[in-house]
Amino acid sequence: MGNLQQRIQKIEQDIQATCDRVGRNRSEITVVAVTKEVSTARTSAVLEENIRHLGENRPEGLLGKQETIQSGAIWHFIGNVQSRKVKEIINRIDYLHSVDRMSLVKEIHKRSNQVVDCFIQVNVSGESSKSGVTPAELDSFIEDVAAYDKIRIIGLMTMAPFTKDMDEIRSVFRSLRELRDGISAKKLPHAPCTQLSMGMSNDFIIAIEEGATHVRIGTALVGAESEGDV
């Protein structure tokens, strides 16, 4: 799979080629390196390659890495977070990608020391195995969030089905973009909703074609710890 520099170079080439093909600017897209499965040492190596946006999905992983990595990183919490764990992470992250219920909104509002930039997780595919607000619930959910002034909804997030059907994946991403467009058009002060967090190692090119602003790339970027390379 090559070393870290080679993987980053390949991803950058793929992103730039996709942007060129669909008429987007590379600067519109943030690569979030998903470091949840790798060591602090490997995460530090990613940071040294000037990829500053790091994604963790468990409080223990986030806090453990932050003991060593105390500056330079922009932290994204990308996993489902239990309400009782909010107090552990909320003042230690820059972005939360998985707001999916009002009880979580209330706990963030209670525990945070500042306004938190959040993505609402939307279950576009309707799979029972996935968390998220349904598309039908989205507008009323966003209206309800307005009562909690420590939540700023900067965008929407979704996960595509695990399938080889590229058309199905594209449909999910396109639907999320359309939902985003509808919300951003309302110009809500608490929900500018200009961003789209979608696309992972296997489908980030499709996500960029469909408007992703944040792609969450794990193995294709950081590699696997068992490989032993950096």
Image (tube, rainbow, N blue to C red):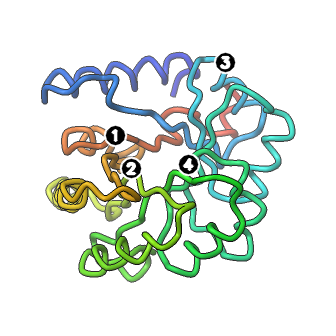
Relative image position of residue 35 (x, y in whole percent):
63, 42
Displayed quadrant of residue 106: bottom right
The numbered mark, 3 or 4, whose residue comes first in the sequence reads 3
The numbered mark, 1 or 4, whose residue comes first in the sequence reads 4
Residue type at tag 4: Tyr
Disc 2 + disc 1, Cβ < 8 Å: yes
Mark 2 or 4, closer to the camera? 4
Relative image position of residue 37 (x, y in whole percent):
66, 48
Q: Residue at x 49, y 24 (%)?
A: 7
Indicate whether 58 appears above or below 229: below
Helix, strand or loop for disc 3: helix
Disc 3 + disc 2, Cβ < 8 Å: no
Relative image position of residue 23 (x, y in whole percent):
13, 25
Q: How many marks?
A: 4
Residue type at tag 2: Ser
Between the residue at mark 2 and the residue at mark 4, the CA separation in whole angstroms equals: 11 Å
